[in-house]
Amino acid sequence: MVSRWRALEVVATATAALAMVVVSAVLAGHVNGGLTDVLLEIDTPTAGILFGYLWLLTLVAAADLEITRHEPADGSSRGPLRAVGWTAGTGAGIALVYLTVVFIVGFVAPGPGSIDPGSVAVGRVVGGGTAAGAGIGGVAGAILHGCDRAAAAVTTVESQRNE
Amino acid sequence: MAVSEYLLVRTLHVLTASLLTGGTALLWLAFRVDDVAVALLTWFEGFFWAGAGLIVFTGLGNLVAFGVPGPGTTRGAALSIKLGVIFALVVGSLVRTFAVARYGRADVQAVNEDDDWLRQLYAATGWGLAAIIVLAGVLARGL
């Protein structure tokens, strides 16, 4: 049985990572000028499914991730570098699964944004996307770890316990 | 059909933003009055992140509905600043949520005025959300 604190951490970690990725992507698209083309290509229900599926994947991945450091019962707490490496691997895994499923659905029900179903083109996008996912996961992991350390610094658990 | 779709997206966006801003301001005020139950903070944090996910998604729908301004325009600059503020708000909110979860794990029942940081984090969240609402107004209608 998962405690509600753990559930809260999982929801917060997954949603924050998703929000940071989406906001960064939109900002990059806005500055480079290609945002309008991408947004107008997808209708609302499809966008909802794509966004919901990515949210679900990050929730599942976050449930398996121990970013926050608690009083470790067995001393097996992850160091910062190991945690960042772990999130980089998770980011690559999410990107690989997400892009593969999106492409399969795109081939079954092609839309205006579908790419050429040639294996080289698909492989290039999936490979590049997976590498980008690893990079994004690493950065997100570093931010999450920093937030956990900041939370530990600002809480006054002992003082609150003694009340 | 397209009109009702965008109306639904806009309504969800505005309602969620209002609820998050109001809830944050209410908790900030509650900290000034008395101890605040960790159970209440936990419920709000869960609601906050569900709302944050919804608001990011509906925000993309709003961009389609209102049109994406060019990066060199006033509205374009407002969009860039708004996205930057949202990013900072997400990071700051993570610190706040992790702090609440730490209290919960430590079996703390209520947070008192000794934790000035948590109160300030709720204040910063409220002001951040207020700034985003102002920027959203500029983005929709200009200065």
Image (spheres, coloured by chain):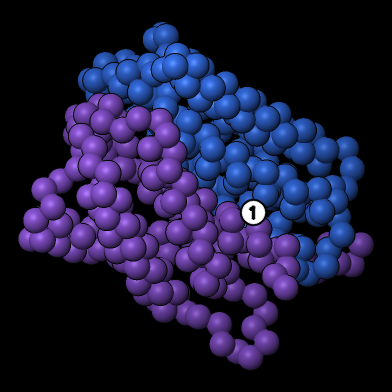
Which residue is farthest front? Answer: A108
Q: Identify the element where label 1 is drawn.
A: helix
Q: Chain letter for purple?
A: A
Residue B125 shows in this picture? yes
Q: Quadrant of residue B114?
A: bottom right
* Shown colour of chain B: blue
Amino acid residing under circle 1: Thr
Instruction: Return the x and y of residue B45 as percentages of the image width and height.
Output: 68, 48
* Relative vertical location of residue B125 with respect to residue B135 in this rendering, above or below: below
Q: On screen, B114 above or below A157?
A: above
Residue at (67% x, 49% y) in the render = B46
Q: Which quadrant holds residue A129?
A: bottom left
Report the quarter where the C terminus of chain B lies.
top left
Q: Chain of mark 1?
A: B
Who is closer to the viewer here, B11 or B124? B11
**Relative horizontal placement of residue B33, taking residue B130 as reference (left or right):** right
Residue B52: percent from left, percent from top:
55, 40
Q: Residue at x 7, y 60 (%)?
A: A120
Q: Is residue B102 visible?
A: no
Residue sitting nearer the eye, B93 or A12: A12
Residue indicated by mark 1: B97
Image x and y of residue A157, in percent: 77, 66
